[in-house]
Image (spheres, rainbow, N blue to C red):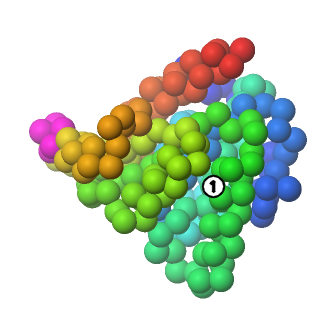
Amino acid sequence: MKIKQIEFVKSSQELSQCPPAKLPEYAFIGRSNVGKSSLINALASKRIAKVSSVPGKTQLINHFKVDNTWFLVDLPGYGWAKVSKKIKDQWEENIHDYLLQRENLNCLFLLVDIRHDPQKNDMEFMEWLSECDIPFVLVFTKKDKLSSKNKIISHVARYKKILKTRWEVLPEMFLTSSSTGEGCDDILNYITQFNQIED
């Protein structure tokens, strides 16, 4: 699948400001500086999300309508963004409200950097998603930053080993690179299949 048309609809500070929940939604989230905006741009094949070297650039819930059939939602990142604790707490509250109450949210794509072991806040977030029965998949970003296929396999295997200490069944996983576009078709095909099931 390729995205033929994508348009920015609106940015919302909180759930009540989001567009009417009439189309299926697929949201993207991850730690600050995980490469979320870059991946979204790669999925869209054009620059729609703002990319910044400063973590925490995405501060609102951003809705993009794709081919008039579903919404791609860019959520604020979490982690070590250089903002005040008050703002971080507000982001967390808004994100939780969206994830818990947005009835047309089909799946959350949780982005993690393939070069690192699971971070504490990633693990805590995954546990919270599981406890709340919020469907999510893992998206490994920055695959191109590893020098060999063996390193990629090794890093993914170690990540899975750590996750298996918490869960018997692991989420679906995708390997991606925003630089090469690798993995983008896999994600979009997954969304297409999800939409067909919904129909």
Q: Is residue 139 above or below residue 81?
A: above
Where is the C terminus found, in terms of image quarters? top right
Q: Is residue 192 above or below residue 155?
A: above
Q: Is residue 153 magenta?
A: yes
Q: Secondary structure at mark 1?
A: loop
Residue 158, how many percent across, how many down?
19, 47
Q: Is residue 180 magenta?
A: no
Q: Residue at x 51, y 40 (%)?
A: 136
Q: Residue at x 47, y 38 (%)?
A: 137
Classified by dominant secondary structure, the portion drawn in magenta counts as helix
* Number of marks in picture: 1
What amino acid type is highlighted by mark number 1? Leu
Q: Is residue 113 visible?
A: yes
Q: Which residue is mark 1?
A: 75
Residue 86, how many percent across, how many down?
65, 83
Q: Which residues are magenta?
A: 149-154
Q: Is residue 24 above or below residue 152?
A: above
